[in-house]
Amino acid sequence: MGLDSQVVSATRDRLSLQELFRTIVSLFKLRIVMLLLAAALGGAFLGAQGVPSLRTLIGIIVTGTLAAGGASAINQYIERERDALMRRTQRRPLPAGEIQRPAAILWIAIGMIVLSVALTLPTNPLMALYLALGAAIYVGVYTLWLKPRSVLNIVIGGAAGSMAVMTGGAAVRAASDPGVIVLALLLFLWTPVHFWALALFYKDDYATASVPMLPVLETDERTAWWIFLHAASTGFAALVLAVHPALGWLYLLPTAAITGMMMVHSVRLLRQPDRPHAIKLFVTTNIFLLLVLIAIVAATSARQVLGF
């Protein structure tokens, strides 16, 4: 084989690996899974009021990735035809026809969820329950039942994110900790803000696919008000968490700053409910949740390690 042929072959191999990685990231929604893992770790650090054991952290990451990734793949399998109608989703692997046997993905995804529960059930039944509930709410309640039928789809479906926090709390035997419960409530309130902002940006897509998202059924002005109310509730829950004995000022300072930023973008959307302001708020909600969770991890770790 000549040098040119070797270069071409190596390039194709790299492209194939890149394509495979892109397909896996998209099919199992690994970006969203990473955010859910961060929520679970936030629940674990908060419940433990410090740094959980390495074994516990690995268990959360492995089982959480399996359960959330599996549920995400089932969601895409069920919605593959609807996704093909929307510009935002039509390039996903299933609607794009990149996978020759879509049914195989369904069974792989079910197996991932079953495996995550099976790995956890013998030693921590409550954690296994929350893993199963998170997948069941996302697939059964949100994807199959509410999303095609009700404007409340993402409101009630947001409980799936709450289950990630409860999974982390259960992993450290602290699911009943008030802080863990408030953090789970925060995820529940945050989800509509996050998704309605995105849905407002892609309103035409959801209308084309006949998905009854709030921006499709209501005016942009009314949608912006509902987003503002949920953003204010989310921010309040985030600030209330500061009274938890494991958090305090080290958590409050960054959380207050990002909460203020989210509220500023919510008010701007109220004043001018258009696509540019909607996508700015969407991005801000991602930063908000990530910083809140980082602040929880940092504050609880500092309290244990440094005695703050």
Image: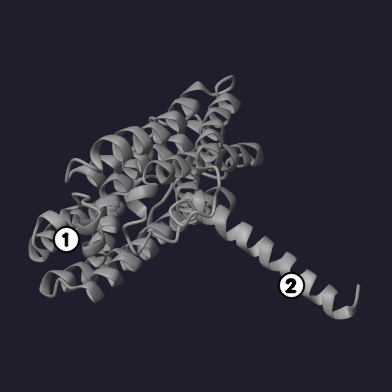
Q: How is the image coloured?
A: one colour
Residue that sits furthest to the right in the current view: 1
Between the residue at mark 1 and the residue at mark 2, the CA separation in whole angstroms equals 49 Å
Badge nearest the viewer, 1 or 2: 2
Q: Indicate whether 285 appears above or below 156.
A: below
Q: Which residue, given by chain and number where applicable, does mark 2 sit on? A: 11
Q: Position of residue 215 (x, y in %)?
A: 16, 58
Q: Which residue, given by chain and number where applicable, does mark 1 sit on? A: 228
Question: Quadrant of the image for the N terminus?
Answer: bottom right
| Structural crowding at the residue carrying mark 1, measured as other residues with C-alpha within 10 Å and reported as few (<14), some (14–19) or many (≥20) | many
Total marks placed? 2
Whether residue 262 appears in this view of the structure is yes
Amino acid type, label 2: Thr
Of the pair 204 and 30, the residue shown nearer to us: 204
Q: Indicate whether 190 appears above or below 110.
A: below
Of the pair 194 and 232, the residue shown nearer to us: 194
